[in-house]
Amino acid sequence: MNGFKFFWRTSKVIQDHPTACIALLLTTASGGSLLAISEHRPFQVAHADVGQADSKKKKVVILGTGWGGTSFLKNLNHPSYEVQVISPRNYFAFTPLLPSVTNGTVEARSVVEPIRNIAKKKRFDTQFREAECLRIDAANKKVLCRSSQDTNLGGEENFSVDYDYLIIAVGARSNTFNTPGVEENCHFLKEVEDAQRIRRTVIDCFERACIPSISEEERKRLLHFVIVGGGPTGVEFAAELHDFVTDDLASLYPSLKDHVKITLLEAADHILNMFDKRITVFAEQKFRRDGINLRTGSMVTKVTNKEITTKERATGEINSTKYGMIVWSTGIGTRPVITNFMKEIGQGNRRVLATDEWLRVEGMENVYAVGDCATINQRSVMEDITAIFSKADKNKTGKLALNDFKDVIKDICERYPQVEIHMKEKQLKGFTALLQNSQSNSKNEVIDIELFKNALSEVDTQMKNLPATAQVASQQGVYLSKCFNRMEECEANPEGPLRFRGTGRHRFHPFRYKHLGQFAPLGGEQTAAQLPGDWVSIGYSSQWLWYSVYASKQVSWRTRTLVVSDWARRFIFGRDSSRI
Ligand code: FAD
Ligand code: MG
């Protein structure tokens, strides 16, 4: 009872003075005190079971508790829904901090938020089922699922859930490109458990290398860490590992420090290809200075339990190297449940599930997909050019005066964002400038369909797929939840852009991604930041920007406090090398 009173009082103080309390908590070096508070939370009364809930409410099923699924759930607030969330993990994971979990800069529990903490705050009925969706039966509006608890608790349970609306946010899996031996011998860095396993394996390698009967050659093998993939995740992991070894392990294992080797393999000519050239150059130079063995143009062809084989792209030379641990981080592939679903709905020849610009799965009425599992199939201007022309040509003369475009310009730019990007690229001010540009030699203010096609012939080259990032997935989740929150009022009051192929207007504005920039932490308290407008900053100051952005992006004050206190603990005491 006393414990309960203490909790009640403490939480009251936190509610009344949140900023002061957070400040106080942040100054304590350990996150322990806050953990203790949250663990003593009184038991919450469960919501009514969905089975008995209001039958007039629309059933929304969300598959996945990652960036897409969680941001949708957090922002959905219309009381006309009842929601079931299905995911094999009962928490949200802040993936950008997973590389920091691999060496204990941040603890695993600091980067996760139980999905039930988020669900219990909803105004409508929200249920969570810890299960994996095995099949999406769109014809019968059902998903078939299998429980995913430890099978020692009893056998697997299969069940199905009906939906009115389905939100697919199952993310992607690691892609091995069918390279032999990768699945069996490499670590991946996708889930929290992966990061924990990597942390234990690194310590294992060091401890085993200390066993006196181990040969010198074997010791070298154990302490050779290989990272495959020079994208942001591989690079950040290599940097974190290097920091862990030099800052912490070198003093704990002084006899081993000269045996450690970190190799980063990249098949392309440079690492961090998606970043500005200045960042790539800086990162490569820094890694070489730090003694990281950076090998670009090197493709992995085979992995066995002790050896990794590569082929040099330029020379065709084959090399085999012994290793202690490999982390494979070369990109993502489609999950089997999505591959099967794609076959069923006639998208079998595609690589990723396609949605329209409103995030609806193509050809489906009530199924939506967000995040890494889907891609937006942006409509090309050339496909619709006749329809666009005839919408502008109101008096149906087959000719357009520039003035005729005034009414449809906004809609064209909204429906086909590549038009705006193209104009920006060519530094053309406005749509009429684009049209005039194509007939610059003539004074003619009237254009026909051929001239129109000519003017727009290049714009489709500006169509790009969105990157598979947390930023995209969470913006899509927020966008979709806003559409759902306004679904009913917008049915009667359409305000979206003009339909060029059909009649009337779309109910909602299409999804538009807003790029906020990206980071590449490079170790040694240095980070490269590429912000919108090609603003590049590299060094210690960007590291502080990185700290503040990642602290602010946490999904709850609980995880924010834990993460910040972990950083503080690392500064004061270093990283913990216990193998637990
Ligand atoms: P996820 O977040 O992967 O979530 C998928 C969810 O679906 C999970 O809960 C999973 O358990 C669940 N699921 C899987 N299968 C099923 C099934 N059959 N049925 C039901 N549920 C299922 N992006 C950035 O923008 N910035 C970064 O700094 C960054 N760093 C990263 C670092 C690492 C180490 C990794 C791995 C990724 C990083 N990303 C980053 C990418 C980002 O994490 C992904 O783009 C993002 O997680 C995609 O969100 P999502 O919701 O599509 O999928
Ligand atoms: Mg998700």
Image (cartoon, rainbow, N blue to C red):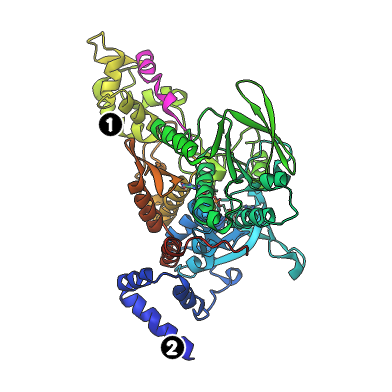
Disc nearer the start of the sequence (1/2): 2
Query: Does the magenta portion include 171?
Result: no
Separation (CA) of disc 1 from disc 2: 65 Å
The answer to whether 570 is drawn above or below residue 17 in the figure is: above
Residue type pointed to by label 2: Lys
Give the magenta part as a residue range.
Answer: 449-465
Can residue 507 be spotted in the picture?
no
The answer to whether 300 is drawn above or below residue 494 in the figure is: above
Please give left or right for residue 296 compared with residue 306 in the image. left
Query: Does the magenta portion include 461?
Result: yes
| Magenta stretch: helix, strand or loop mostly | helix
Please give left or right for residue 77 compared with residue 86 in the image. left
Q: Residue at label 2?
A: 5
Query: Dot 1: what SS?
Result: helix
Furthest-bottom residue in view?
Answer: 1
Task: Kindly identify the residue that appears in the image at 39 percent across and 81 percent down.
Answer: 10
Local packing at callout 2 (Cα closer than 10 Å; few below 14, some 14-19, many 20+) is few
Query: Dot 2: what SS?
Result: helix
Q: Quadrant of residue 506?
A: top left
Q: Give the image location of residue 486, x and y in percent.
A: 39, 54
Q: Give the image location of residue 158, x and y in percent.
A: 72, 61
Front position in the image: 218 or 325: 218
Task: Kindly identify the residue that appears in the image at 49 percent across and 68 percent down.
Answer: 117
Q: Give the image location of residue 366, x and y in percent.
A: 54, 49
Q: Classify mark 1 as within 8 Å of ligand 1 or not, answering yes or no.
A: no
Residue type pointed to by label 1: Asp
Front position in the image: 549 or 428: 549
Q: Give the image location of residue 151, x and y in percent.
A: 75, 65
Q: Residue at label 1?
A: 407
Task: Kindly identify the residue that appears in the image at 53 percent across and 74 percent down.
Answer: 47
